[in-house]
Image: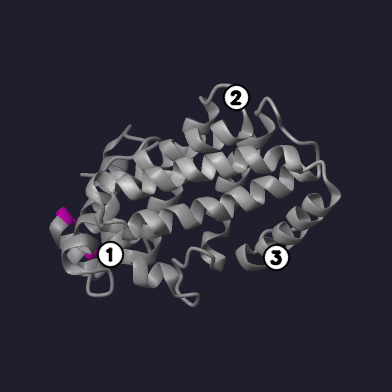
Amino acid sequence: MIVLPGAPLTNKGELTRERILGVALQLFNTTGYESTTMRQIAARAGASPGLAYRYFGHKDELVLEFYRRLAAAFEAEVAGIPTASLADRFERAMQAKLELVQAHRPVFAAVFGAAMNPDSNIAVLGDKTADVRQRVRAAFVRVVTGAADAPKEPQAGQMATVLYGLHLGLLLFWLHDRSAESRATWEMLALTRELLALVRPALRLRPVARSLARLEELSRLVMRFEA
C-alpha cells in the first residue's frame, strides 16, 4: 500500500480509503490508467464497488488525491529548507520534489497520457487540478520569499510563478530521463541553479525585469493562475 506524508490513518474507514488508493495506483501501473476500472480496484482492495465509490466517485479522483498528497508533502519539505540564496533554495526544493516522486515514477508514467491531455479531468493544467497548482505555486512563493536575496514584490510573485513552470519542465525531463540513476536530471538541476544564480542579480536591470514580467504573464495564461 502506498502511503504518502499527510495520509490520515486513524480509523477503519480511513484505512479502507488508503487501501483503495494504494491498490488503484498499483493497478494503474500494471494494467494502465485507461484500462483500469473502479470495479477492478474495489475487487483488488477487498471492497464492494459501492464502498469504493463512496470514497472515490471516479478513478480520476484517485489520481487527484495522489496529486494532493504529493503537494502536501512538498509543502512540508519546503517549510524545512534553511535560509540561503534563491538559486540554492530552488535547488533544495527540487531535490526534495524529485526524491518525493522517485518512488512513484511508474504511476506518473501510467497516467502521463491523461495528465498531458488538456481535456482530461487529471490534466496537469486542467480545471480539476487548479487547487494543486495553487498549493505548489504557494510553496514556490515561500521558496522565493525565504531567500537571503529575495526580490521585492512584484518580482517575488513573478519569480515564484516562473519557478513553478520551471519545476514542471524539470519533472517532465526527469520522467523521460533514462540515464543511470537519473544523472542527467540531477545535472540539469545543477545547471538550472547556476543559471538562476546569474539571473537573480540581473533583475535590477529594467530590460531583465520587464522580461520576467512578460514571462510570468504568459506563464499565468497557460497555467491558469489568477492575476
CA distance for labels 2 and 3: 28 Å
Query: Residue sitting at 33 percent across and 65 percent down?
Result: 111
Whether residue 90 is situated above or below residue 80 in the rendered picture: below
* Residue 144 appears in the picture as rendered: yes
Whichever of labels 2 and 3 marks the residue nearer the N terminus, that label is 2
Q: Which mark is residue 218?
A: 3
**Residue assigned mark 2:** 84
Three-letter amino acid code at the position of disc 2: Ala
- In the image, residue 71 lies in the stretch drawn in magenta: no
Mark 2 or mark 1: whose residue is earlier in sequence? 2
Give the residue at x 60% y 48%. 163
Secondary structure mostly seen in the magenta stretch: loop
Q: Write the start and end of the magenta stretch as one range.
A: 45-49
**SS category of the residue bearing label 3:** helix
Looking at the image, which is closer to me, 31 or 14? 31
Q: CA distance from mark 2 to mark 1?
A: 36 Å
**Which image quadrant for residue 122?**
bottom left
